[in-house]
Image (cartoon, helix red, strand yellow):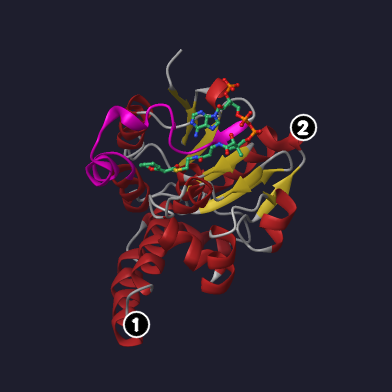
């Protein structure tokens, strides 16, 4: 079995981290396969991406038994986690983290690099890093600070406290918690909704929000104007306005 499985259902690509015995902890092989899967997700026919885990884990982060694969930690991070986190952010379509179970360390960072997080009620969230004397890497210090705000992010990431799915929802870390039995069906439904959305507008919204983190209002207004001009040239905009006039649901094609 591959350590990362890729499946396509219509316009949805599902990427499953697949080392269930090790809670889908990351090895070099997992990084390489994830990189290939994210490259495949650039296909314009893919309009929504789901990242999830096999078994009872989403991911427990770095495989601590494979830590010795490279002596140079910074170089290892740059060559592996950084590439995949940046690939998720630059993907011009929504990426949904379907957090089916345990989510820790760089697995938590990866989930937080995604655009939307849905959690099973069987999931729980653990910083991990501080438990072994490390700092939140793989974008953890960036995304978790933005999602939770500095006081809460700092308190949590320095405590290593387990957060239940319900607590993660109350904090805004995940947008929805679903009973474990109904989780797969809900993920399929949510991913299909995203894949049927106006993909170009969603991609531009994703980029605008990322840029807003470091922009002035003036810069952002200008970016919005340029992006809106582009969105207004899409077939999906024409379809949206036509459907509105005809009092029917729009059929967006992602172009
Ligand atoms: C694991 C792991 C794991 C290997 C569970 N590795 N086997 C760091 C270093 C440098 C550069 C790159 O970046 C990073 C980033 C990081 O991600 S650092 C943080 C690494 N992650 C952790 O420290 C979490 C370690 N794991 C845990 O604390 C627990 O396993 C959690 C809280 C995630 C889950 O606890 P349980 O539900 O009680 O499961 P378990 O501990 O029994 O784990 C099940 C199996 O998975 C077990 O194997 P075994 O053969 O005994 O059944 C674990 O050894 C294995 N496993 N995490 N990261």
For residue 151, which quarter of the picture? bottom right
For residue 224, which quarter of the picture? bottom left
- SS of the residue at dot 2? helix
Which range is magenta? 57-81
- Residue at image x 29%, y 82%? 219
> Does the closest atom of ligand 1 sit within 8 Å of the Cβ of label 1?
no
- SS of the residue at dot 1? helix
Residue 211: percent from left, percent from top: 33, 69
Disc 1 marks which residue?
A: 221
- Label 1 CA crowd tier, 10 Å (few <14, some 14–19, many 20+): some
Q: Which mark is residue 181?
A: 2
Residue 35: percent from left, percent from top: 32, 34
Is residue 45 something that shows in the picture?
yes
Q: Compared with residue 108, is residue 69 higher up or lower down, i.e. above or below? A: above
Return the disc, 1 or 2, that comes first in the chain's sequence. Answer: 2
Q: Is residue 93 magenta?
A: no
- Residue at image x 39%, y 52%? 137
Residue 153: percent from left, percent from top: 54, 65
Residue 162: percent from left, percent from top: 66, 49
- Residue at image x 43%, y 46%? 253
Is residue 196 something that shows in the picture?
no
Q: Judge by depth and name the residue closer to the eye, 54 or 142.
A: 142
- Label 2 CA crowd tier, 10 Å (few <14, some 14–19, many 20+): few
Q: Is residue 60 magenta?
A: yes
């Amino acid at each position: 079995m591959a350590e990362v499985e890729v499946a396509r259902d219509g316009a949805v690509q599902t990427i499953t981290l697949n080392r269930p015995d090790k809670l889908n902890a990351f090895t070099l092989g997992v990084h390489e396969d994830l990189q290939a899967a994210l490259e495949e997700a650039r296909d314009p026919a893919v309009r929504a991406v789901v990242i999830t885990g096999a078994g009872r884990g989403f991911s427990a982060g770095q495989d601590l038994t494979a830590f010795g694969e490279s002596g140079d930690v910074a170089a290892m991070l740059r060559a592996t986690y950084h590439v995949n986190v940046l690939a998720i952010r630059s993907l011009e379509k929504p990426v949904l983290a379907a957090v089916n179970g345990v989510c820790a360390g760089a697995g938590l960072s990866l989930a937080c690099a995604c655009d939307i997080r849905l959690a099973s009620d069987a999931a729980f969230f653990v910083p991990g890093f501080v438990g072994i004397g490390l700092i939140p890497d793989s974008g953890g210090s960036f995304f978790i600070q933005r999602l939770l705000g500095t006081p809460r992010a700092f308190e949590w990431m320095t405590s290593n406290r387990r957060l239940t799915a319900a607590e993660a929802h109350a904090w805004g870390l995940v947008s929805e918690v679903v009973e474990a039995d109904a989780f797969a069906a809900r993920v399929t439904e949510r991913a299909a909704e995203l894949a049927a959305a106006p993909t170009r507008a969603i991609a531009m919204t994703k980029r605008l929000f990322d840029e807003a983190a470091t922009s002035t209002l003036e810069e952002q207004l200008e970016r919005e104007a340029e992006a809106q001009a582009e969105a207004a040239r899409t077939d999906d905009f024409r379809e949206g306005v036509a459907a509105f006039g005809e009092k029917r649901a729009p059929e967006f094609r992602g172009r």
